Amino acid sequence: MASPISAINYLSSRWGGVYEFLDDFTAQKVKAVSQASAHYFPYNLVLNKASHYEVVEKDKAKAQELFKQAHVMYDKSQVARDGILRTY
């Protein structure tokens, strides 16, 4: 499972990737793993997008929206909580 999550990070638009490709990639991975593990891929993709909007686009409102979405997906996420606080 670590390899697909690493791929999400390295294929982000921050490094020249395209989010449409990552959305498709994530959808494929969700289908390929157990239901118990499937939530990790969309969660990591949302965190990646939130980071992109915070750091690259400098769009704190969009970044906060995505960090909140990630927090709803996994309420124990310290990364999402920290992102919400940073973009408040």
Image (cartoon, helix red, strand yellow):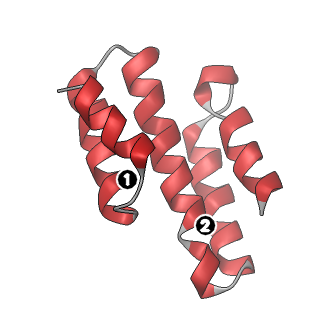
Mark 2 element type:
helix
Q: Amino acid at mark 1?
A: Ala
- Judging by the rendered image, the residue that carries numbered circle 2 is 27
Q: Is residue 29 above or below residue 79?
A: below
Q: Is residue 37 above or below residue 9?
A: below
Q: Nearer the viewer, residue 57 or 47?
A: 47
Q: Is residue 69 above or below residue 36?
A: above
Taking the image as shown, residue 72 lies to the left or right of residue 11, namely: left
Between disc 2 and disc 1, the foreground one is 1
Q: Nearer the viewer, residue 5 or 22?
A: 5
Q: Amino acid at mark 2?
A: Ala
Instruction: Determine the residue positioned at 46% across, 37% down.
Output: 49
Instruction: Give the farthest residue toward the right.
Output: 3
Query: Residue 74 appears at what percent x and percent y?
Result: 40, 63
Mark 1 element type:
helix
Query: Residue 82 appears at what percent x and percent y?
Result: 34, 35
- Disc 2 crowd rating (10 Å Cα; few below 14, some 14-19, many 20+) is some
Q: Quadrant of the N terminus?
A: bottom right
Q: Quadrant of residue 50?
A: top left
Query: Residue 11 appears at what percent x and percent y?
Result: 71, 36
Q: Quadrant of residue 88?
A: top left
Query: Residue 55 appears at what percent x and percent y?
Result: 44, 16
Instruction: Determine the residue positioned at 24% across, 31% down.
Output: 85
- Judging by the rendered image, the residue that carries numbered circle 1 is 70
Taking the image as shown, residue 57 lies to the left or right of residue 1, namely: left
Instruction: Determine the residue positioned at 42% across, 53% down.
Output: 77
